[in-house]
Image (cartoon, rainbow, N blue to C red):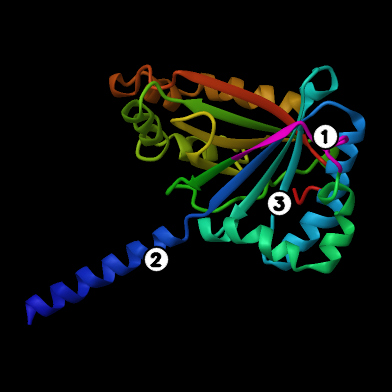
């Protein structure tokens, strides 16, 4: 009898683990490279009028569209689009589903049918990610100031090797870095591991702030925090990032958050 009780409990734990694992979201981050105002306007119109409304009908909510603050003065300009997804299969199926949507095809005509002489972008990157187990779902920011003032910070941490990269992921999850960010109210949108992308091995995460002053104050508090000082000083977590990219961004008016 005890054997069957033990077996049932083990099966329950196993099935619960699978269920919890399935709840971890995936993300696609599209990074559009463009040069001109005309290209920017076409991309904006496409996402506002065509893609986002059509994606919402497919059940994809909380789509973020962002522009780096540095776009104003940079020669090379970018737009970041973040899609939360249930699976890799969903990402693969989106294009064919959209093509069957007449309203989408009409609203997105200028982008979809752009001639080769005037493309709407120079190129775009697609980054596919899986959410951390300690942050399995996207979290919309809880900010009080007007949306136009909000600042989003996208960070990318590359590792020297796969093994060293896994150490940084461990630092976020088992090490307690994710709960630390939560305690200090960083309003993190997501934390995720890059599965495929141009920079690997790599993890990415996004935090959000009321404005730039609020962002600077949060990072000052983070750097002074005793828990962070203890965590970052642990021998097992030394030199586990080979390159860190920090991108400060503003959400577009039509972004879902």
Q: Earlier in the sequence, mark 1 or mark 3?
A: 3
Pick whichever, 112 or 3, lies toward us.
Answer: 112
* Residue in the picture at 49% in, 52% down: 136
Q: Can residue 87 be seen in this view?
A: no
The quadrant holding residue 13 is bottom left
Pick whichever, 214 or 93, lies toward us.
Answer: 93
- Residue 92 in the figure: left or right of residue 228: right
Q: Which mark is residue 63?
A: 3
The quadrant holding residue 14 is bottom left
Mark 2 vs mark 1: give the one in front: 2
Q: Where is residue 52 in the image (x, y as percent from the top left)?
A: 77, 56
User: Would you name the residue on which mark 2 appears?
Assistant: 19
User: Would you name the residue on which mark 1 appears?
Assistant: 149
Question: Magenta segment, principal secondary structure?
Answer: loop
Q: Where is residue 128 in the image (x, y as percent from the top left)?
A: 54, 44
* Residue in the picture at 52% in, 55% down: 88
- Residue 138 in the figure: left or right of residue 143: left
Residue 223, magenta (yes or no)? no
Label 1 with label 3: CB-CB less than 8 Å: no
Q: Position of residue 196 (x, y in %)?
A: 50, 40
Q: Earlier in the sequence, mark 2 or mark 1?
A: 2
Relative to 32, residue 242 above or below: above
Alpha carbon of mark 2 to alpha carbon of mark 3: how far?
24 Å
Label 2 with label 1: CB-CB less than 8 Å: no
Bounds of the magenta span? 115-126
Relative to 97, residue 200 above or below: above
């Amino acid at each position: 009898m005890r054997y069957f009780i033990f077996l049932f409990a083990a099966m329950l734990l196993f099935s619960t683990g699978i269920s919890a694992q399935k709840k971890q979201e995936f993300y696609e981050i599209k990074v559009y490279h463009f040069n001109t105002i005309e290209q920017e306007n076409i991309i904006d119109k496409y996402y506002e009028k065509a893609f986002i409304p059509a994606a919402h009908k497919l059940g994809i909510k909380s789509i973020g569209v962002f522009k780096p603050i540095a776009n104003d003065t940079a020669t090379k300009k970018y737009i970041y689009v973040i899609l939360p997804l249930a699976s890799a299969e969903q990402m693969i199926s989106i294009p064919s589903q959209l093509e069957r949507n007449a309203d989408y095809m009409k609203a997105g005509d200028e982008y979809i049918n752009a001639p080769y002489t005037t493309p709407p972008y120079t190129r775009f990157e697609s980054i596919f990610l899986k959410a951390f187990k300690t942050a399995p779902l996207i979290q919309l920011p809880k900010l009080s100031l007007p949306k136009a003032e909000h600042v989003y910070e996208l960070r990318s941490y590359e590792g020297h090797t796969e093994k060293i990269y896994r150490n940084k992921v461990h630092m976020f999850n088992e090490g307690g870095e994710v709960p630390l960010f939560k305690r200090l109210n960083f309003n993190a949108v997501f934390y995720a591991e890059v599965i495929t992308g141009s920079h690997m091995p790599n993890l990415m995460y996004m935090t959000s702030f009321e404005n730039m002053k609020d962002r600077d104050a949060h990072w000052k508090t983070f750097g002074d925090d005793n828990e962070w000082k203890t965590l970052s000083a642990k021998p097992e977590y030394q030199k586990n990032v080979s390159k860190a990219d920090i991108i400060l961004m503003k959400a577009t008016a039509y972004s879902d958050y």
